[in-house]
Image: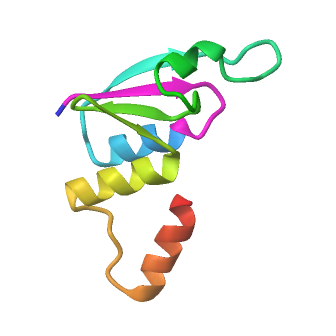
């Protein structure tokens, strides 16, 4: 599995990096910096039309939105999934 995380400083992409570390998955980081107005760089739209972070390339597919990225990896790896209804609700609220 090939994973590249497009990481913007001071963004929710940090959540993706945390999860990949917890799952002990190998990944590469493409770092991006905010502009002088603290906005994501306009060039990010060339990677994905939303131009929002995180953007994660996985085996040729682009994933966006931090909650969706977290769910994708948790489901794909079959780990960190709650075992009862209360834990499931807490997990869903954390991801979104």
Residue displayed at 28% across by 48% down: 23
| Residue toward you, 24 or 60 | 60
Quadrant for residue 10, please give it. top right
The spot of residue 87 in percent (x, y) is 44, 79
Q: Quadrant of the N terminus?
A: top left
Q: Is residue 59 left or right of residue 73?
A: left
Placement of 19 over or under 52, stated as above or below: below
Most extreme residue toward the right is 37
Q: Quadrant of the C terminus?
A: bottom right
The question of residue 39 being in magenta is answered with no
The spot of residue 35 in percent (x, y) is 73, 14
Residue displayed at 69% across by 18% down: 34
Q: Is residue 57 left or right of residue 6?
A: left
Residue displayed at 50% across by 78% down: 89
| Residue toward you, 39 or 21 | 39
Residue displayed at 42% across by 87% down: 85
| Residue toward you, 10 or 37 | 37
The spot of residue 18 in percent (x, y) is 44, 43
Quadrant for residue 81, please give it. bottom left
Scheme by which the image is coloured: rainbow
Placement of 35 over or under 68, stated as above or below: above
Q: Is residue 8 left or right of residue 91?
A: right
- The residue segment tinted magenta is 2-13
Q: Is residue 48 left or right of residue 29?
A: right
Most extreme residue toward the bottom is 85
């Amino acid at each position: 599995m090939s994973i590249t995380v497009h990481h913007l400083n001071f963004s929710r992409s940090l959540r993706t990096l945390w999860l990949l570390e917890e799952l002990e998955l190998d990944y590469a980081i493409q770092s991006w910096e905010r502009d002088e107005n603290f906005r994501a760089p306009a060039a990010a739209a060339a990677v994905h039309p939303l131009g929002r972070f995180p953007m994660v390339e996985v085996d040729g597919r682009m994933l966006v939105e931090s909650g969706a990225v977290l769910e994708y990896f948790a489901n794909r790896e079959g780990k960190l999934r709650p075992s009862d209804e209360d834990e499931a609700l807490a997990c869903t609220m954390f991801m979104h």
